[in-house]
Image: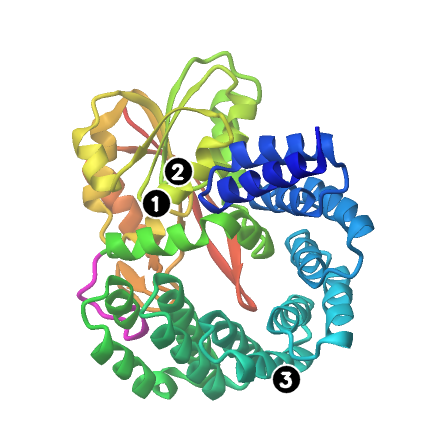
């Protein structure tokens, strides 16, 4: 076949790539390379496809092959920088971005890649001027405002942090991701400077987006509203949809230990290599962290997961642990579920409920006799009430309140242990792991 055939195949591959048909684009690019192994466009497309699949090592392989053909290609160098960033090799990401900037100091993509690399290395002092330079060239990029705001906030300049986080909200047209970032920025400022420090920014946010579920719930949290008895479902869904891709990495950074603690509680009942063919409901399953650990000690169990977040369910499905997964609100799911479960686990889920009685009643109904309900709750160290809505949007509970709700539902307290659940900033979050049994 001729060189023109390779060009046509590469053209067709690019067209398939642009319409999102990556399987066809891959096959056409490979065909083009069989005709001309130095076809740069096909090498680039294959690198991009594997990048989108998050197979970064393979993406780099194709980018390296293109580098031999077109060593000076600027877009390629930026792609390589972004790939190293995704692999958390920030030094290499920085090196490739700086290489582009040596010959093109106004390249926004390279400036952005460099600023992100500094940011991820916790070098906020160096990231701030680079973000500013990128924004001078492209003031419409709300993600640049987002990260510049975070850099200011992490440097202790909360006023500028709030200012740029607000710019990100408005420029994005009120995107969920930017509302969530603004909420985090206000939360951090309130922790460091006091709640009065954020009053004006919070009110401006409420005035502009009064119907937004995230905004309303965060405002209630930052003002410790006693009227709120559970987190708004739309708020929870939006939060976890936004963070699904990075959820497990974020928890690792917080020294999150609840799944391991629940595994230990289950092992006290069933041992570490049980033959029991249990039906296990993972309530608020998230990405499947808890079920993954439980499956190691309950290899014959059938796991069922339910979560509000579609994207969390998508991540959980990748683990190939669950027999069935449901996208639903926990209260609705437990009200209509027919399967009698032998065990229900809720890892860091009841922290989004203040009032627990309805949840306990529903779970008691769908547990089989002799079944166990294992869950975590955060200890209320803030006041003497049954539960407390923290600035973070999470509820903390009084020990006696949890026990009272359990008893009213008909549960028997089988086990209770105090533990550190996670870190939150510089503070340790303490709580309990409860095991309740249905007689």
The secondary structure that most of the magenta stretch takes on is loop
Q: Which residue is mark 1?
A: 309
Of callouts 1 and 3, the N-terminal one = 3
Residue 191: quadrant of the picture? bottom left
Residue 129 numbered tag: 3
Q: Residue at x 78, y 61 (%)?
A: 72
Query: In the structure shown, which secondary structural element does the residue marked by tag 3 occupy?
Result: helix
Model colouring: rainbow
Q: Residue at x 52, y 27 (%)?
A: 267
Which x, y percent locates residue 229? Answer: 21, 58
Judge from the rendering whether residue 433 lies leftward or rightward of residue 227; answer left or right: right
Query: As drawn, which residue projects farthest toward the right?
Result: 68
Query: In the structure shown, which secondary structural element does the residue marked by tag 2 occupy?
Result: helix
Check whether the beta carbons of the residues at disc 3 and disc 2 lie within 8 A of each other.
no
Query: In the structure shown, which secondary structural element does the residue marked by tag 1 occupy?
Result: loop
Judge from the rendering whether residue 386 lies leftward or rightward of residue 149; answer left or right: left
Check whether the beta carbons of the residues at disc 1 and disc 2 lie within 8 A of each other.
yes
**Mark 1 vs mark 2, CA separation in Å:** 6 Å
Q: Residue at x 32, y 73 (%)?
A: 222
Residues 187 and 58: in front is 58
Task: Determine crowd level at label 2: few under 14, some 14-19, many 20+ residues with C-alpha closer than 10 A.
Answer: many
**Mark 3 vs mark 2, CA separation in Å:** 39 Å
Of callouts 3 and 2, the N-terminal one = 3
**Mark 1 vs mark 3, CA separation in Å:** 37 Å
Task: Determine crowd level at label 3: few under 14, some 14-19, many 20+ residues with C-alpha closer than 10 A.
Answer: few
Numbered range of the magenta stretch:
221-229
Residues 24 and 411: in front is 24
Q: Which residue is mark 2?
A: 313
């Amino acid at each position: 076949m001729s060189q023109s055939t390779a060009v046509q195949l590469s053209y067709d591959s690019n067209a398939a790539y642009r319409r999102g048909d990556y399987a066809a684009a891959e096959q056409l690019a490979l065909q083009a390379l069989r005709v001309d192994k130095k076809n740069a466009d096909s090498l680039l497309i294959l690198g991009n496809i594997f990048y989108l699949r998050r197979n970064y090592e393979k993406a780099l392989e194709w980018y390296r092959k293109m580098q031999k053909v077109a060593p000076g290609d600027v877009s390629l160098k930026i792609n390589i920088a972004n790939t190293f960033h995704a692999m958390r090799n920030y030094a290499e990401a920085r090196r490739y971005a700086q290489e582009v900037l040596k010959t093109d100091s106004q390249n926004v993509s390279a400036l952005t890649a460099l600023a992100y690399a500094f940011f991820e290395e916790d070098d906020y002092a160096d990231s701030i001027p680079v973000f500013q330079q990128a924004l001078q060239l492209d003031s419409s990029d709300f993600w640049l405002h987002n990260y510049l705001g975070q850099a200011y906030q992490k440097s202790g300049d909360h006023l500028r942090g709030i200012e740029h986080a607000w710019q990100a909200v408005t420029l994005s047209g009120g995107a969920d991701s930017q509302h969530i970032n603004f909420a985090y920025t206000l939360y951090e400022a309130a922790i460091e400077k006091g709640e009065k420090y954020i009053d004006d920014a919070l009110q401006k946010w409420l005035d502009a987006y009064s119907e937004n579920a995230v905004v309303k719930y965060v405002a209630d949290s930052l003002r410790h509203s006693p009227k709120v008895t559970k987190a708004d479902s739309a708020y929870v869904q939006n939060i976890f949809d936004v963070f699904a891709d990075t959820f497990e990495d974020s928890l690792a950074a917080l020294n999150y230990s609840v799944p391991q603690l629940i595994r230990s509680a289950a092992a006290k009942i069933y041992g570490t290599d049980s033959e029991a063919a249990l039906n296990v409901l993972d309530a608020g399953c998230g990405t499947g962290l808890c079920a993954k650990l439980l499956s190691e000690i309950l290899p014959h169990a059938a796991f069922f997961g339910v979560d509000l977040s579609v994207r969390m369910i998508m991540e959980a499905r990748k683990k190939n642990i669950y027999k069935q997964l449901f996208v639903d609100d926990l209260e609705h799911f437990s009200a209509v579920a027919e399967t009698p479960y032998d065990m229900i686990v809720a890892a860091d889920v009841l922290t989004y409920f203040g009032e627990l009685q309805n949840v306990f009643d529903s779970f008691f109904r769908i547990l089989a006799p002799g079944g166990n309900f294992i869950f975590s709750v955060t200890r209320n160290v803030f006041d003497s009430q049954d539960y407390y809505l923290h600035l973070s949007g999470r509820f903390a509970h009084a020990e006696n309140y949890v026990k009272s709700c359990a008893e009213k539902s008909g549960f028997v307290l089988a086990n209770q242990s105090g533990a550190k659940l996670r870190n939150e900033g510089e503070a340790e979050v303490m709580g309990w792991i409860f095991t309740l049994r249905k007689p």
